[in-house]
Amino acid sequence: MWRGSFAIIAAPMAQIRELKKRMVAVRTIQRITKTMQMIATAKFTASLVRSKATRPYTDRIRGLVGEVAAAAGSDFSHPLMSAPATVAKRELVLVIASDRGLCGAYNGNVLRKANIAIKALNASGKQAVIETAGKKAIAFFRFAKLEVAEKHIFGDKPQFAQVEALAKRLMEEFSQGKYDAVHVVYTRFVSSSKQVAESMQLLPLAAPAAGAAVASSNYEFSPSGAEILADLLPKSVVVSLFQAFNDAAVSEHVMRMVSMKAATDNAAGLGRTIRRNFNRARQARITTELTEIVSGAAALE
């Protein structure tokens, strides 16, 4: 009798101890994810301010390039607006990912987009030269056994001086005919609920839209449009690349914030389920003990 009673009581006791451990573990995870959510929220707010601050300048300088290019006329040419004279059959792909994980589908989306772009270049008979920004991109291409020519680490807050140095090197190598084109694969920030992974052609620069000629007719340029454009085009490349890095940083932080909020909510729900199971197991143990006491008292009568 005692041996059987011990087995009946020991099983709920082991279950209760296990549930207690799980409750402690879930509460710890919930505190960690909540902290990470708060950190990501603070970083998202700061990076959003930087991205919004640079966006008007980026859009305006692109529009100004179109207007001045239209005023310069069709005879104007610049190394950054046309493909090199000699075809290198090589195009550079700069992939902007994150240094850390736990940011939902952020890295998966941008790396999938980069993989598609690289395969398309290889299928067209061109060699894709890969450069990365972010440790997750380095790990992905190492796993895919694809060579990475250059690895860049810019952190959570890209500095303009660092991006400018990278843009100048890319412009120089493109002008020298080392690459036929330069692409940037990054995540464009649309809103807090929408971030789009896309491939942007950084070089050669696209020709101005036909409507820009009408806008440029209201201005007289001194010095000439060609001279102004020669100074504006490199600036346009630099600010476009810097905006891509800013958009990528904002997208990373907002997706990490959403991901950690979901993890916190899931941990809270799991904690409630474990607490309910714990209460049931404890009640079952109490009922078993009361049954044993009543049975023992009845046996003594």
Image (cartoon, grey):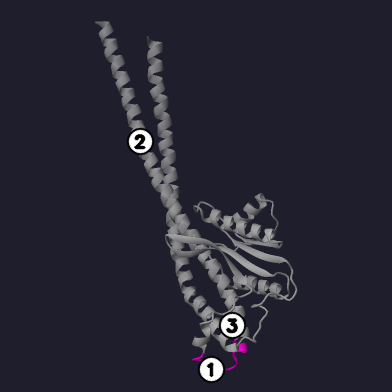
- Distance of mark 2 from mark 3, alpha carbons? 64 Å
Between residues 175 and 296, which one lies in front from this camera angle? 175
* Secondary element at tag 3: helix
The numbered dot on residue 275 is 2
Q: Residue tagged by mark 3? A: 232
Q: Residue tagged by mark 1? A: 220
Magenta: main secondary structure: loop
Query: Is residue 222 highlighted in magenta?
Result: yes
Which mark is nearer the camera, 2 or 1?
1
Query: Which residue is rendered at x = 50% and y = 87% of the image?
Result: 214
Is residue 128 shown above or below 238? above
Mark 1 belongs to which amino acid? Glu
- The image quarter in which residue 28 lies: top left
- The image quarter in which residue 25 lies: top left
What is the x, y in percent for residue 255?
47, 56
Mark 3 belongs to which amino acid? Leu
* Secondary element at tag 2: helix
First in residue order: circle 2 vs circle 1: 1
Mark 2 belongs to which amino acid? Arg
What is the x, y in percent for residue 12?
38, 24
Query: Which residue is rendered at x = 38% and y = 35% of the image?
Result: 274
Is residue 77 shown above or below 268? below
Is residue 164 visible to us here?
yes
Query: Which residue is rendered at x = 48% and y = 69% of the image?
Result: 51
The numbered dot on residue 210 is none
Specify start and end residues of the magenta stretch as a single range: 217-228
First in residue order: circle 1 vs circle 3: 1
